[in-house]
Image (cartoon, grey):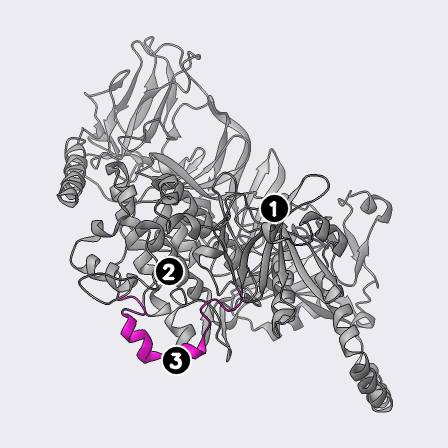
């Protein structure tokens, strides 16, 4: 009966939504006899956009004519303003009207023109109208001619602070007209502000933000897939984006792939925000923001300076370069940039040094040729003494084309998924072939002489050297064993909070009162050193609000310990699988946890300095802070991949039953899609309150994934939802999350979405693709496909215990 009522309520919501949409078909045109006045509006035929008079705030008397989202958004999300620089203070008698031969004008009661349209083509409309299209574009056209090429005027050609799907940003080289965004002066004044955002075709196209005439942000050049310096701009199932560039135009635009609302807005503080409308939460969800950090600020480190947010300080000179002004550089004034350690000597011959993993420099002073090979590109640059660097123009299909830089290289940023660039260097910095041959010969001679001694020393001091190398590699604060003994009362049983295959976890309190968690590896573990070192190297270089923070480590008297921030609420599994504690996790909290885990994985897979595959994502490895915010922990078996790689394989499969993807268990192949599979399992566990492994049901013997798939195919997904989460306000969101989770656990890794796509799915209500059968459909299928000896049930991870 309860399930029936939930389904009935859900269907009622759908019918109500359809009813609202059906009554939203207001008139969408302004004609010669039907004006737009205060209190009246026109709406796009689909009811998405509305146009009329508005005032940005109750305390101002300034009024404007604008376009905003209609039924979907409770507050006016204004996307375009007509008279943004010329407000009217009295709307009584004011009107927006269309007049022959086809001009749209805003007039006051005194018949004074405040704003009007201009046409770039001869006006020839016999019966002109202004129409608000479903795209949010206001067009002036002949009533009998709806061809786009015959529009007399359109608002999409005059953007304000918002780029909508279908709008273009760039320049028409034939007419000279530029299309760009300009911020509001402030949140209550739509007059053009200080910031503008352009698709700048000078040199080779790149997006550039300016404050006045000064560059403050650059995306880097277009590389065939995206802007070089915006790795978060990836292929997804919500929208597509492209650069149309030829001898007549250079236009950047994006288009929707489904019925979802998304926009790109530049606020009055000069921050670009890509937003999606979350219908269930009635709010805009910002999922991409630029500039995002110090290194996004244009030219932070000056010429030939490289910016990296992971490092302190963030600026350093590229290899073979030194600070131009060492004194200022030492006090973090990096504006002078860097210079080559050895000056160029073009007449005697220069060469090129390859730098990888960077955002390509500003292309204002550049040259390109799409038909060249990289070798031809190098020769062209070498012949011109003013050419400072070269790179592939297009990185697709192994790379093609030629991009050359002239003058100093500005705005270099180290980032995951960055590109290769070859920078001009003096030959003395590269080493001649003759020099290399001599060095090689000497190396072989010396090596043959001392090899016996090295082997002897290695054998004799193996244990000591291994310990010293371990310390050198960690690059972390080292805690004295005495400090940790005192913090944990000599690792007393009362302070023990968890235990796993490689040791135990203890709570400690440092002298200053800071609470810590200490992961103490077992001395008897034969694999502990590798996992210990791996975990430190991985997590020490990662910084994100949804990753547990590593404070330091301890290596003394045979002990190997990791010191973490203490998580007050310990691990997620203690809540979702406990009948009493699960009551503390309502759906908004669980949804926040799901989003946090997704953001943490996105950082690991795409945005971190290292591309990390976790390989053991599960409920017990999600820790919760005092505010129930999730943090991914336990990187003992995590693996990093280089460059644009997204996976690898292994002969030693380790992990946790119920969370590992089929391709990993059966073939030892792991990738970012393996983590996506584990994420999908976690989502289903959070929704159902049941474990995947060990799940049982009275009517069948399949596991949780199989059970969810059965309910999904039979149209009964509501039966999966934890009884504590049956608040009707969240039913549609829960059903969507079940669908998203099923997409994540599909059998084929190619079918699963990547984490950027998952983030988009969580943030909006776009139509989702049909899910295919999940991996590990039944328990019997698992048993027949692989031996349990191939993997570990909990081989090296930490499982937190109930407090005693």
Judged by its main secondary structure, the magenta piece is: loop
Instruction: Name the residue: 51% across, 43% down.
Output: 289
Q: Which residues are magenta?
A: 772-796
Which disc number belongs to residue 753?
Answer: 2
For marks 2 and 3, the one nearer the N-term is 2
Would you name the residue on which mark 1 appears?
A: 296
Judge by depth and name the residue closer to the eye, 272 or 642. 642
Give the mark toward the camera: 3 or 1. 3
Q: Is residue 246 left or right of residue 447?
A: left
Q: Let me know if residue 397 appears in the view.
A: yes
Residue 374 point in image, percent of width and height: 59, 72
**How many neighbours does mark 3 have within 10 angstroms: few (below 14), some (14-19), or many (20 or more)?**
few
Q: Is residue 607 left or right of residue 769?
A: right
Q: Is residue 204 left or right of residue 580?
A: right
Q: CA distance from mark 1 to mark 2?
A: 28 Å
Instruction: Name the residue: 80% across, 76% down.
Output: 431
Residue 709 point in image, percent of width and height: 24, 61
Q: CA distance from mark 3 to mark 1?
A: 49 Å
**How many neighbours does mark 1 have within 10 angstroms: few (below 14), some (14-19), or many (20 or more)?**
many
Residue 501 point in image, percent of width and height: 54, 67
Would you name the residue on which mark 3 appears?
A: 787
């Amino acid at each position: 009966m309860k399930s029936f009522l939930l389904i009935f309520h859900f269907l009622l919501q759908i019918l109500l939504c359809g009813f609202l949409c059906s009554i939203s078909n207001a008139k969408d045109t302004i004609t010669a006899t039907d004006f737009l006045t205060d209190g009246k509006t026109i709406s796009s035929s689909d009811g998405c956009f509305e146009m009329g008079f508005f005032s940005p705030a109750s305390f101002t008397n300034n009024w404007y004519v604008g376009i905003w989202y209609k039924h979907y958004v409770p507050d006016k999300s204004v996307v375009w303003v007509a008279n943004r620089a010329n407000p009217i203070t009295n709307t009584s008698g004011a009107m927006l009207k269309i007049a022959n031969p086809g001009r749209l004008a805003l007039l006051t009661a005194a018949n004074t023109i405040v704003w009007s349209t201009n046409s770039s083509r001869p006006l020839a409309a016999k019966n002109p109208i202004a129409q608000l299209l479903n795209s949010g574009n206001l067009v002036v056209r002949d009533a009998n001619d709806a061809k786009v090429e015959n529009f007399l005027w359109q608002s999409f050609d005059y953007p304000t602070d918002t780029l909508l799907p279908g709008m273009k940003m760039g320049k028409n080289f034939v007419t000279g007209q530029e299309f760009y965004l300009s911020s509001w002066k402030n949140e209550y004044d739509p007059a053009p502000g200080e910031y503008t955002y352009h698709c700048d075709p000078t040199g080779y196209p790149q997006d550039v933000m300016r404050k006045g005439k000064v560059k403050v942000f650059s995306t880097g050049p277009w590389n065939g897939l995206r802007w070089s310096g915006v790795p978060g701009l990836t292929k997804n199932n919500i929208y597509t984006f492209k650069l149309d560039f030829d001898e007549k135009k250079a236009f950047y635009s994006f288009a929707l792939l489904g019925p979802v609302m998304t926009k790109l807005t530049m606020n009055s503080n000069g921050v670009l925000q890509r937003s999606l409308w979350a219908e269930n939460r009635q709010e805009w969800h910002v999922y991409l923001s630029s500039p995002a950090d110090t290194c996004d600020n244009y030219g932070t480190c000056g010429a030939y300076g490289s910016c990296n947010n992971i490092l302190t300080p963030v600026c350093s000179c590229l290899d073979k370069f030194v600070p131009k002004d060492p004194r200022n550089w030492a006090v973090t004034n990096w504006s002078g940039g860097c210079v080559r350690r050895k000056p160029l000597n073009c007449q005697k011959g220069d060469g090129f040094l390859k730098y990888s993993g960077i955002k390509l420099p500003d292309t204002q002073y550049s040259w390109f040729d799409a038909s060249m090979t990289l070798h031809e590109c190098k020769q062209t640059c070498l012949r011109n003494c003013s050419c400072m660097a070269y790179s592939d123009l297009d990185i697709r299909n192994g790379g093609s084309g030629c991009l050359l830089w002239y003058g100093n290289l500005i705005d270099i940023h180290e980032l995951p998924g960055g590109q290769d660039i070859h920078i001009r260097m003096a030959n003395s910095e590269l080493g001649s072939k003759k020099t290399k041959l001599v060095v090689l010969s000497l190396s072989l001679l010396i090596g043959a002489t001392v090899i016996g001694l090295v082997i002897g020393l290695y054998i004799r001091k193996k244990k000591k050297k291994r310990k010293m190398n371990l310390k050198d590699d960690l690059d972390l604060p080292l805690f004295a064993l005495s400090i940790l003994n005192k913090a944990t009362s000599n690792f007393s049983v009362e302070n023990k909070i968890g235990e796993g295959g490689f040791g135990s976890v203890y709570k400690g309190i440092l002298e200053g009162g800071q609470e810590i968690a200490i992961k103490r590896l077992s001395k008897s573990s034969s694999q502990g050193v590798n996992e210990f070192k791996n975990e430190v190297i991985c997590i020490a270089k990662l910084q994100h609000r949804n990753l547990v923070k590593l404070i330091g480590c301890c290596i003394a008297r045979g002990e190997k310990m990791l010191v973490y921030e203490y998580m007050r609420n310990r691990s997620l599994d203690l809540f979702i699988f406990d009948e009493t504690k699960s009551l503390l996790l309502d759906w908004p909290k669980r949804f926040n946890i799901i989003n946090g885990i997704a953001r943490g994985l996105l950082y690991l897979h795409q945005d971190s300095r290292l591309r990390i595959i976790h390989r053991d994502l599960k409920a017990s490895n999600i820790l919760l802070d005092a505010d129930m915010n999730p943090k991914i922990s336990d990187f003992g078996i995590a693996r990093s991949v280089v460059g644009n790689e997204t996976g690898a394989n292994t002969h030693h499969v380790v992990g946790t039953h119920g969370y590992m993807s089929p391709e990993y268990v059966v073939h030892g192949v792991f990738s970012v899609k393996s983590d996506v599979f584990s994420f999908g399992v976690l989502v289903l566990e959070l929704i159902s309150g049941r474990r995947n492994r060990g799940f049982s049901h009275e009517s069948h013997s399949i596991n949780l994934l199989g059970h969810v798939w059965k309910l999904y195919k039979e149209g009964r997904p509501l039966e999966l939802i934890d009884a504590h989460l049956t608040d009707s306000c969240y039913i549609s969101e829960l059903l969507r999350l079940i669908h998203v989770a099923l997409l994540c656990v599909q059998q084929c890794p190619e079918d699963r979405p990547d984490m950027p796509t998952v983030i988009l799915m969580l943030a909006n209500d776009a139509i989702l693709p049909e899910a295919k059968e999940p991996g590990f459909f039944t328990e019997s299928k698992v048993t027949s496909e692989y031996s349990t000896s191939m993997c570990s049930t909990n081989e090296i991870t930490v499982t937190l215990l109930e407090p005693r």
